Amino acid sequence: MRFRVKDVADNRILAGGLTGRRFLGRLLERVDGEPESPEPLYLDFDGIEMATASFLRECILEFRNIVRRRWTNCYPVVANANDLVTEELSVLLTQRDALMLCSLDEQEKPSLPLVLGDLEPKLRVTFELVKELGEADAGALMRRSKDGDEVGQTAWNNRLASLSKLGLLMEMSRGRAKRYRLLPLEG
């Protein structure tokens, strides 16, 4: 699913917290409920010249937080953000927060995935292990861990859940079991 930011924006420069909150309302109105299966929701910034940190905090990060709390199969991804927008996002994401970015073509084919932000070391290790395995559950990560981390399955479950809450990993439920994988952001 793709949401073109420029189609709703009043202009190509998005500035201020109040503007961000207003835009958040428009964005939430356009989200059409829960997808049947896990899928990215691309927030396409193509054509946007600039978005300030205050706008991005009140709109994009808050949108991600609301969506990840409300709809478990929807994973917001910032697409086609230029260097100025990416720089402003990076200013926000220095406090143990991260966001997935990518490029997106007209056929909604993603490429160049990037985790922007600051993941704590244990979450970074968890993310990299899932990336290496392709798909995993807490038991597989516990068995595969190379960092000398001798924590139990519950700790791995908590790490996986944290990465899913940030929208960096997709959660797939199979009965009571949960498995996790990367967002499908490479062709």
Image (cartoon, rainbow, N blue to C red):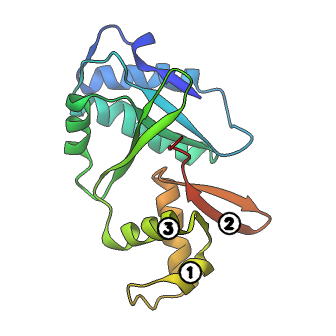
Where, quadrant-wise, is the C terminus in this rendering?
A: top right
Q: CA distance from mark 1 to mark 3?
A: 21 Å
- Local crowd at mark 1 within 10 Å, few (<14), some, or many (≥20)? few
**Rendered location of residue 173, percent (x, y):** 72, 60
Residue drawn at (31%, 67%), measured in percent from left and top? 120
Nearer the N terminus, badge 2 or badge 3? 3
Q: CA distance from mark 1 to mark 2?
A: 12 Å
**Rendered location of residue 25, percent (x, y):** 47, 23
Residue drawn at (52%, 83%), measured in percent from left and top? 144
The residue lying furthest to the top in this view is: 10
Q: In this orientation, does residue 161 appear?
A: yes
Q: Secondary structure at mark 3?
A: helix
Q: Decide: is 12 above or below 50.
A: above
Label drawn at residue 132: 3
Q: Secondary structure at mark 2?
A: strand
* Disc nearest the viewer among 2 and 3: 3
Label drawn at residue 178: 2
Residue under label 1? 154
Q: In this orientation, does residue 8 appear?
A: no
Horizontal side, residue 20 vs residue 39: left or right: left
Nearer the N terminus, badge 1 or badge 3? 3
Residue drawn at (54%, 32%), measured in percent from left and top? 109
